[in-house]
Amino acid sequence: MVPPRARRPPTSGGSWRPPRTWRSRRPSDCRPSIPASAAGPTSPRTRRVAGLRRHAPWAAEDLPRLVELERDGIEAARGNSLVHGDLYPHNILLTAQRVVFVDWPHARLGAPVIDLVTFLSSVAAAGVDPEPYVPTDGAVTEVLAAHAGFLLAGGLAAGATPIIEAKLHLGRGALAWLETRL
């Protein structure tokens, strides 16, 4: 049986692009996950920064540095490898013979470090040290900063749905791992 012809992930120009929630497709005009123009006493940005202070005071104090790392991470995530883009444990099935990755709607071209950081963020959220599994090359810290920003932008949103709670849990794990790398 011949496998179906692989379709190129939907991208502009065939290269990796960050998810829409990262607000920008070009590193030259990247913005933080929470735009400063949205700030006000009850704005989503103000509520999220206050939430960040509650969960990780160090990150709220170092927010400008983390935003810069996030910008670098978006650039470092560019590449020509097929990446899953949503490689969390709930998208990995284990059988006696093999490992199967499922749920591919976020697949695209990018740097392989994307999937590594996504998966290892889950490892960190589970309380396991991900560092023994991290290669020495690549922009792990920068991509991790972008990933943590993405998760926390959703996890610190108003409301308490299961998805928001899951993003907060994963974001806190990613942020705790990031703190050990800085």
Image (tube, rainbow, N blue to C red):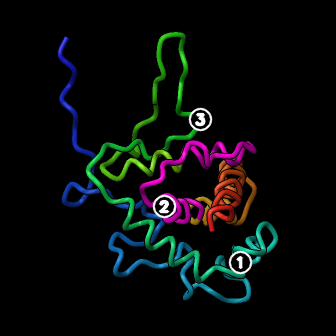
Secondary structure category for the residue under label 2? helix
8 vs 93, left or right, is left
Mark nearest the camera among 3 and 2 is: 2
What residue is disc 2 on?
143
Q: Residue 4 — which label?
A: none
Contact flag, marks 3 and 2 (Cβ < 8 Å): no
Kind of residue at disc 3:
Pro
Kind of residue at disc 1:
Ala
51 vs 147, left or right, is right
Q: What stretch is highlighted in magenta?
A: 119-148
Q: Which residue appears farthest toward the right when viewing the image?
A: 54
Q: Is the magenta stretch mostly helix, strand or loop?
A: helix
Above or below residue 64? Residue 104 is above
x, y (%) of residue 60? Answer: 71, 78
User: For the image shown, how many numbered marks are present on the structure?
Assistant: 3
Secondary structure category for the residue under label 1? helix
Above or below residue 121? Residue 38 is below
What residue is disc 3 on?
89
Choose the circle earlier in sequence order: 1 or 2.
1
Q: How crowded is mark 2: few (under 14 residues within 10 Å), some or many (20 or more)?
A: many
Kind of residue at disc 2:
Val
The answer for how far apart the CA atoms under marks 1 and 2 are is 19 Å
Q: Residues within 10 Å of mark 1 (few under 14, many from 20)?
A: some
